[in-house]
Amino acid sequence: MIAPAQRMSMLGTETAFEVLARAEALARQGRDIINLGIGQPDFKTPPHIVDAAVRALKDGHHGYTPAPGIPALRQAVASDLERHRGVAVDPNRVVVVPGGKVTIFFAIMMFGEPGAEILYPNPGFPTYESVIRFSGATPVPVPLLEEKDYSFHASSVLAQITPRTRMLILNSPANPTGGAVPREEIDALVAGLVDHPQVAVLSDEIYSRMTYDGRRHVSLLSYPELEGRLILLDGWSKTYAMTGWRMGYGVWPDSLVEGATRLAINCHSCVNAAAQYAGIAALEGPQDSVEAMVAAFEERRRVIVDGLNQIPGFSCRNPGGAFYAFPNIKQTGLESATLQRRILEEAGVATIAGTSFGAFGEGYLRFSYANSRENINKALDRIAELMSQAVA
Ligand code: PLP
């Protein structure tokens, strides 16, 4: 009998894909399902980006590229970082990979091993905990606090660091909470990290362009104190509505670029060549579609947060970024998974239970507002009706 390695039993998954499958099955049975479960923009990739990929294919860019990405793309990433984060980065530190997730996998596999501890946000993007376990390391959850708008106290995070801590993962703005960590908390965290030079930092900033109420994104890249141990993750999936193109990047410390490149060579060789040309067009071309998309999200955020706060048993903070609302549903008296199932089966609205993002997600549901205002309003009406029956 074949016997996969023991570590395969440590891999988790993303329940979002299971909810999507169930929602699609219900839709095939003729049910009208509104999908507020999926974590991707409901916009199309802007046409000038698509055109750049088509042109690249017609121009014959059909072969392998250098493993960390074509030089012009790495340069375009460096220029973009300077534009949006005000930091000059050597393009040789940029490693382009197929999606944001790949930098997560590489960074954790680089630092995780039995005996090592890795701190990660909980509730948080499920891949963090899953890959930490897969690496053999011990996942140490950093609880995100509703009363802090899903941020944390820097002092509490610093108190969780032990001599075994190898890496700290941060994600702001965050999935699934929409929380954005305020500058003063990041300042305090970075100041405290100076006393823990053995801790690498993975900053997942994939929602960096989606911040609201005039907030400016605070990038860990702008802290010189972290030089030599910061891995910055960003990409094209969310900003340019390119989830299916599989394009992301990591900015690695000089000492880790070679390792990240070797991982790329062993794993995927390089990213699809035409997609890389599209990536250049995205970064260097007009940004008006990004601005229009973010403005639409900000408007929908108001609609969904107002609506959720009117549903019996729900209360919802105003998220600072990304495109998720994460209401507290404890007053309904139902567990998150039960409520998720009932809302899908009985109201025809797909959402994701907070527990899909870690144990600290119990008592919450994730709503993605990457859907039209009309659908969001319809979904809210249906849930309000279901909940008023449930409470009555
Ligand atoms: N990081 C976070 C916090 C995310 O929410 C996601 C996607 O949902 C990713 C990384 C992965 O993005 P990609 O689709 O580019 O792999």
Image: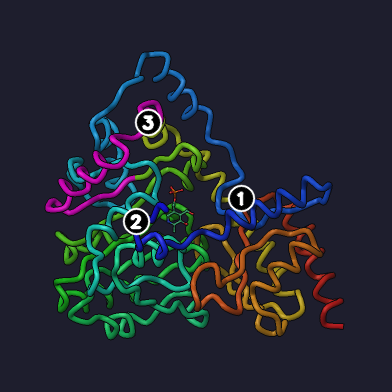
Label 3 crowd (10 A; few <14 / some 14-19 / many >=20): many
State which tag comes first along the sequence, 1 or 2: 2
Q: Is residue 185 left or right of residue 93?
A: right
Q: Nearer the viewer, mark 1 or mark 3?
A: 3
Report the disc number at residue 104.
2
Marks 1/3 in contact by CB < 8 Å: the verdict is no
Amino acid at dot 3: Asn
Residue 339 lies, in percent from the top left, at: 70, 72
Label 2 crowd (10 A; few <14 / some 14-19 / many >=20): many
Report the disc number at residue 296.
1
Q: Write down the region rendered in magenta.
A: 249-277
Amino acid at dot 2: Ile
Q: How far apart are the two marked residues, 1 and 3, measured between alpha carbons?
A: 30 Å
Residue picked out by circle 3: 272
Of helix, strand and loop, which one carries label 2? helix
Residue 42 lies, in percent from the top left, at: 61, 45
The quarter of the picture where residue 193 lies is: bottom left
State which tag comes first along the sequence, 2 or 3: 2
Q: Is residue 261 above or below residue 303?
A: above
Q: Is residue 3 above or below residue 66?
A: below
